[in-house]
Amino acid sequence: MTGNWQPLAAAETLGKIVATVLMLAMIGVTVVDVVGRRFGLTIAASFEVTQLLVALGFYLILPQATARRAHIVVDLVPQRLDRTAGLVLAALVDLLCAFVIAWAAAMLVRQGQTLDRFNTLLQFTRLPLSPFVTVMGLCAGLTALVCLTQSVLRLHAAATRWRLK
């Protein structure tokens, strides 16, 4: 995915590190909470912290997974198309995904602003919720840009193939 472009390679490495740290933190919180229950010592905020870590882990890695096309994919449209038509169809699907994800990103950012306006705090940790939701929205927005870029690249490839015919 990254080729020789160093900033993208660095961002990919950073994404892997962040995902690993979040996963280890989630495991750590869960293990400590489960073992602590055996001795009557629980972490009151373990459910909250786990929810935040799962959400952040998902949204922070989403742009990278999308750029790598590392998702599980189900083709709903049988593709008995030639290569050029297949590229156009894939570009349209990428474009649709970009719009849907951009809409979700806008809703998350708007929700983050609402939560900030009302100074909404998490119940146990008393952390403000708005920064987490806003980061999720920004990551979704970045994912939408990745989808849009992939759509443009596929359309360019289809146009090139069509011109060569």
Image (cartoon, rainbow, N blue to C red):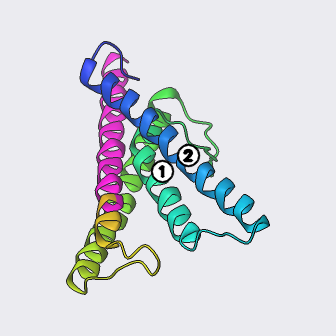
The answer to whether residue 130 is seen in the rendering is: yes
For residue 129, above or below residue 154: below
Q: Residue 24 location, x and y as percent?
A: 56, 43
Up/down of 116 relative to 161, above or below: below
- Is the residue 118 above or below the residue 140 in the image? below
Q: Which residues are magenta?
A: 136-165
Instruction: Check residue 146 for magenta coloring.
Output: yes
C-beta proximity under 8 Å, tags 2 and 1? yes
Mark 2 element type: helix
Our reading of the magenta stretch's main secondary structure is helix
119 sits to left or right of 54? left
Cα gap from disc 2 to disc 1, whole angstroms? 7 Å
The disc label shown at residue 57, or none? 1
Q: The disc labelled 1 sits on which kind of residue?
A: Gly
Residue 23: image tag: 2
In the picture, the disc for residue 134 is none
Q: Which comes before the other along the chain, label 2 or label 1? A: 2
Which residue does the image show at 56% across and 35% down from the upper left? 81
Pick the quarter of the image with the N terminus. Answer: top left
Residue 6 located left or right of residue 88: left
The amino acid beneath tag 2 is Met
